Amino acid sequence: MSSPFPDPAIGTHLLLLDPDSHARLRCAALLRAWGYRVTDSSEPALLDRIPLLPVDLCLLDPSDAREAGWSALTRLRQRSRLPVIVLLQHDSTLERVLALERGADAVAPKDGEPRELQARIKSLLRPREGDPTEVLMFGRFKLEPMTRRLSGPGGFCVVLSQSEYKLLRAFLERPHSVLQRQELLHLARGDGVTALERSVDLMVSRLRQKLNDDPSSPLIRTVRGVGYLFDPPLR
């Protein structure tokens, strides 16, 4: 019997797991329109076959009646770093926190803006750290990963703390996407770190100061009641 999974050498392969057949078919069609190879299923148990499957990223709605999706995500994180985007029907804060605590790399509303989902997929498929000697450019700013040195207009140069560096990297990997505070906390502080969401506001404030962020045309925009959006300059 032939494998239901496509040749791993042909394109980027996404695994879509959703108990809602109508939503799954709509999402699979969208992903294929973007050029991805897609395997879709209602069974979260497929996650237990990772990393044996030739999959590059998983999109998971864990809210099946048996709570099997949440359990499968927890088991996956014990043995694999496969990028996972959790898709939430109601997009509640509690479920966002639960998804990140269980090991999701990102969270997205099922009925949200398709371009936001597309941007998150692309950012997770890129290498997380890349070459440590690579210089990252955004507008007139320059970030050196090896030294965490940030330089910009007017000749200023500062060294970011580890958490500030991770926060800026998170923004750079997800430009023009609204990131909730809990998600930023997870990205900037890492797994297993307990902190209050207001600590994200403090980190963002410090990063804004080091960027000399102009309040009249900010790089980091506050989305009231939700989180932050990074709007990097084109030049």
Image: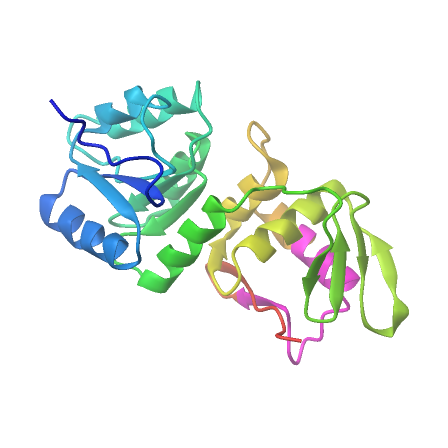
Nearer to me, 16 or 167: 16
Q: Is residue 204 magenta?
A: yes
Q: Is residue 90 toward the left or the right of residue 151 in the image?
A: left
Residue at image x 78%, y 60%? Answer: 210
Magenta residue check for 36: no
Q: Is residue 193 left or right of residue 9?
A: right
Seen in the picture, residue 64 relative to 138 is either above or below; the reply is above
The structure residue drawn at horizontal position 64% and vertical position 78%, both measured from the top left corner, is: 217
Name the residue at 62% across, 38% down: 189
List x then y, in percent, for residue 2: 14, 26
Image spot of residue 190 (x, y percent) = 59, 34
In the picture shown, does residue 230 fall above or below 9?
Answer: below
Q: Left or right: 194 with respect to 149?
A: left
Q: Which of the 4 image quadrants contains residue 100?
A: top left
| Percent of width and height locating residue 157 | 87, 60
Q: Which residues are magenta?
A: 203-222
Quarter of the picture holding the N terminus: top left
